[in-house]
Amino acid sequence: MRDDWDQPHGPASDTRDAAPIEKRPILIVLHQKHSVPGHIGRTLQLQGHPLDIRRPRFGDPLPKTMADYDGSVIFGGPMSANDPDDYVKAETDWIGVSLREQAPFLGVCLGGQMLARHLGAAVSLHDQGHVEIGYHDIIPLKSAADEGAWPNRFYQWHKEGFELPAGAELLATSPRDDFPNQAFRYGETAVAIQFHPEISYAMASRWSGYNPEKLRQVGAQARAEQLRDHIANGPIVRAWLDRFLSSWVETGRRARSLPSTQRRVAA
């Protein structure tokens, strides 16, 4: 995985001088044999969390409880949250374990679409076949400010988008009409994002280099533009990611320590 991390790594938290806090593993769910968790995995490790990487598509089981974890992340992939495959349904259903236990959950692109589907919202293609590929603007809302200021530009790679589930809080939208819902929070600890803050230069280079046909779609940036924009925007996104993941874990710690009657429970 180290080959997929940019240099320099940015201001990830250094916990060596902090008061000792038990850092439990983060469950990482990936969808291809060669996939890596990129800067999300790197940042979580620098913050002291072991990674438990599983690929249910290839037979890995998912835990029956999140009691031994500080959170879970379901990443993206070329499949759809609407696909009938058993592992897609199993992952989507499993999200309920995190929601019921108030364990931090982060859905990235496909993972966010799975959360939306779990909550009864639609996931669909753009009606004119548009996509978002490369760096695109988003509009962070005031509801996102708990983790500090969000960047207004993230790397995207998707052709489907999610509707906002009932009871969810929209965190970011888009200045364009193509995919208006860019991020939402459900309950205290579940977050879905449409974009890819985990992307490294190597990943952006590989994705754009291996899929030239996708770059001809409406809404896709040219490969050279993607790589140029990553150099400009990557450090900003990585600084935000360090703050966001730290806050995400801490919010889960607080939520799980409350008596059940005081929690804003997610169904």
Image (spheres, rainbow, N blue to C red):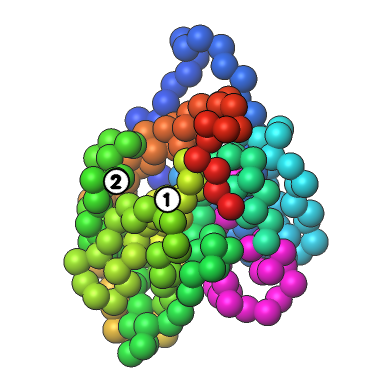
Q: Which residue is mark 2?
A: 143
Q: Secondary structure at mark 1?
A: strand
Image height of 215 relative to 66, above or below: below
Image height of 207 relative to 16, above or below: below
Q: Judge by depth and name the residue closer to the eye, 235 or 189.
A: 189
Residue range in magenta is: 71-92
Q: Judge by depth and name the residue closer to the eye, 77 or 182.
A: 182
Q: Type of residue at label 1?
A: Arg
Q: Judge by depth and name the residue closer to the eye, 40 or 88.
A: 88
Q: Earlier in the sequence, mark 1 or mark 2?
A: 2
Q: Type of residue at label 2?
A: Ser
Q: Which residue is mark 1?
A: 185
x and y, in percent, of residue 215 in the image: 35, 80
Real-space Cα distance between discs 1 and 2?
A: 9 Å
Residue sitting at the far left = 175
Q: Residue at x 69, y 40 (%)?
A: 66
Q: Residue 124 vs residue 91: left or right?
A: left
Does the magenta segment cover residue 242?
Answer: no
x and y, in percent, of residue 126 in the image: 37, 83
Does the magenta segment cover residue 87?
Answer: yes
Q: Is residue 3 visible?
A: no
x and y, in percent, of residue 260 in the image: 60, 32
Residue sitting at the far bottom = 128
Q: Residue at x 49, y 60 (%)?
A: 112
The image quarter containing residue 111 is bottom right
Q: Residues within 10 Å of mark 1 (few under 14, many from 20)?
A: many
Q: Is residue 16 visible?
A: yes
Residue sitting at the far front = 261
Q: Residue 205 vs residue 120: left or right?
A: left
Q: Residue at x 58, y 63 (%)?
A: 118
